[in-house]
Amino acid sequence: MSGRDRRPVTIYEVAERAGVSIATVSRALRDSDLVAPATRRRVHQVAEELRFRPSRAGRALAEGQHAANGIVFPDLSGPYYAEVVLGYEEVVAELGRSVLILATNGRTKADEAVLELAGRVDGMVIMGRTVGDHVVASIADTGLPLVLLARPPVGEVDTVTADNENSARDLTAHLLWHGHRHLAFLGDPGESPDVAGRYRGFRRALTEHGFTVPAATPCMFDVRSGYAAAKDLLRTRPDAVVCANDEVALGALRAAEDLGFSVPGDLALTGWDDIMAADYARLTTVRQSMRELGATAARWLDERIGGTTTTARREVLPTRLVIRASCGHHADLADLASTGTTTPGGTP
């Protein structure tokens, strides 16, 4: 074949041979600092071997001036998801990208929807138990940049979570230290990796101190579900209820009032997340940085798309116990620690 008849090499061929995205090829050929030196050298070498000459149109395509990231949520209702989305979008907007959001709640073919979205974006964040590990693995195998959010790791995919187990253990130990003995857990560990971690911490504290661990009382993670489940649970007369999140706790608080229970006189009640309403309700809870979860996922995904990182990353963001009136004990952990007071397990 003569040089005149040779088909031009495309940026996709260079990307495939080099094992990177087309955006990384474009940046590497411009010697961008966003691409690791070793990756730049590999792209230059492949481009030279294939005699690739980038066109203006190809460069615009690779740079993705209208590029979109995808993010998959279990649901979009409630303050928790709203805060995560805000954190994610703030970073993505600074990076000049758009976002395609997919909620799997209520979808009969969630796997197919997520796989279809994966074909339309430059990278994707998958949150919670939206699709199975096999779907995550199949997407990762295509080379699409991925970050997992609030779910256990899958293979070599980057994963960002918040600490659930340790803080739940501290929260439960705090209740035990103040004399509560009939504890209950309100929420479904099978529906959320985060809640599964909180139940593990609850179970761990009870086991460490020689108490029987009750089965979790399942309910969905909204106020109405918390109210309905708590009305049944409270008839068993627990003296403390650890709720999966603040919305469930707010529903339980209303149920306790309707049944004539005093909080915290008859019942200690705790939540999780520290949403705005938790402060107004004087709800003991665990504070996590929901916006930072979204922001971290967005930054990591951009780095993956840009080819600036190669090894899998794992980060567990810290959480903090916030003691308010709903458990009957107003002192913060820091105040207790300063006096030398500890729980039976050594935590204030």
Image (cartoon, helix red, strand yellow):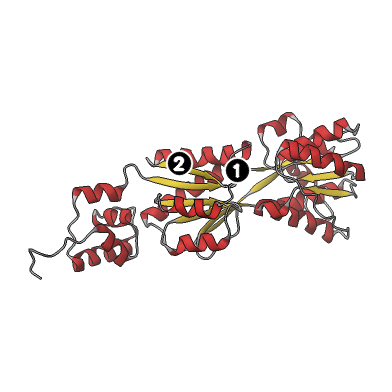
Q: Residue at x 87, y 45 (%)?
A: 178
- Determine which residue is flagged by label 2: 91
Where is residue 142 drawn, in percent x and y? 42, 62
Q: How many marks?
A: 2
- Determine which residue is flagged by label 1: 75
Where is residue 239 drawn, in percent x and y? 89, 44
314 versus 98 height, above or below: below
Amino acid on which the number 2 mark rests in the picture: Val
For the residue labelled by badge 1, is the local secondary structure a helix, a strand or a loop? loop
Marks 1 and 2, how far apart in space?
21 Å
* Viewport quadrant of the N terminus: bottom left
> Mark 1 or mark 2: which is in front?
1
Q: Residue at x 51, y 45 (%)?
A: 102
Amino acid on which the number 1 mark rests in the picture: Asp
Q: Nearer the viewer, residue 61 or 116?
A: 116
Give the residue at the far front of this rendering: 108
